[in-house]
Amino acid sequence: MHEGLPPLPSLFAPLKLAPDEDARARAMALAPERGGGLLPWLAAPDRIEAALVLEPEESLAAARAGLLAAASAAADALVVLGPPEIPVTLRWPAGIVLNGAQVGEAFLGAPPGLPEEAVPDWLVVGIRLAWRHPEGYEPGRDPGRTALAEEGFLEIPPGELVAAWARHLMAGLSEWQSRGFRAMAERVLARLEVEEWMEGARRGLDPATGALLLRREGAADERRPLEAA
């Protein structure tokens, strides 16, 4: 074990945080000094957070698609560790969904003020997953949200979930690098929920920006960008 995590490849530098900290904020604060591979994470009574510092080689606009890779890796980890046949999907742009209810989301952090065409020195991608509902939560109050403890993950140590996410993320990024953007895009699109505003459209991802492209016959392409995420 390293700081509560199962063994990970040496390229990772885990950093366990206190339950009241913010993994994204700490990763962004430490990224200029610590560089790629830094993995701040925390396990709080209500949530699990993890962030990974990357050192991209492409522009910020193109590197934003790392947000999709982080969400896809979380889905992969939940499929492997969770109860058999539990449905795990993604909700645009970075929602992570179990049994039709959102259990968390991926997030992104970049150097402030950096132009979209510039190559960032670092980029942070991460996930935030609900572990338990807050104290006093009334079941059924928000059927669109769920927590891992309610979906059969209570016996899975949080550190094991974080380690599985980190491994799947690096495998996905390696595939992206070796096989091209399309390989990563196909994995994301295969899990992406078809919402009402997507119906009747062919879906794709723009390799230059990670934007969702919706193509309908006789109509101009519709774009849903990642910038807002």
Image: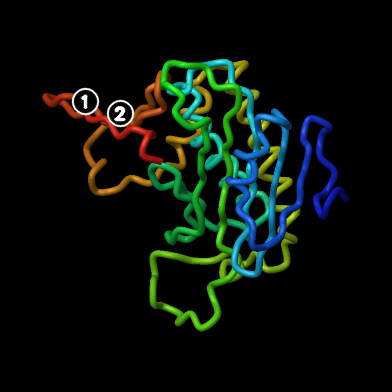
Q: Quadrant of residue 47?
A: bottom right
Q: Quadrant of residue 44?
A: bottom right
Residue drawn at (69%, 60%), measured in percent from left and top?
A: 43
Residue drawn at (42%, 59%), measured in percent from left and top?
A: 100
Seen in the image, is 165 located left or right of residue 202? right
- Residue 105 coordinates in the image, percent (x, y): 49, 50
Seen in the image, is 53 located left or right of residue 8? left
Residue placed farthest to the right in the image? 1
Number of numbered markers:
2
- Residue 117 coordinates in the image, percent (x, y): 42, 16
Label 1 Cα crowd, 10 Å radius (few <14 / some 14-19 / many 20+)? some
Amino acid at dot 1? Asp
Alpha-carbon distance for marks 1 and 2? 7 Å
Question: In this view of the protein, which residue sits in the foreground, 30 or 163?
Answer: 30
- Name the residue that disc number 2 marks: 213
Label 2 Cα crowd, 10 Å radius (few <14 / some 14-19 / many 20+)? some
Q: Secondary structure at mark 2?
A: strand
- Name the residue that disc number 1 marks: 221
Quarter of the rendering occupied by the C terminus? top left
- Residue 24 coordinates in the image, percent (x, y): 58, 45
Residues at marks 1 and 2 touching, judged by CB atoms closer than 8 Å: yes
Q: Quadrant of residue 170?
A: top right
Amino acid at dot 2? Leu
- Residue 32 coordinates in the image, percent (x, y): 66, 29
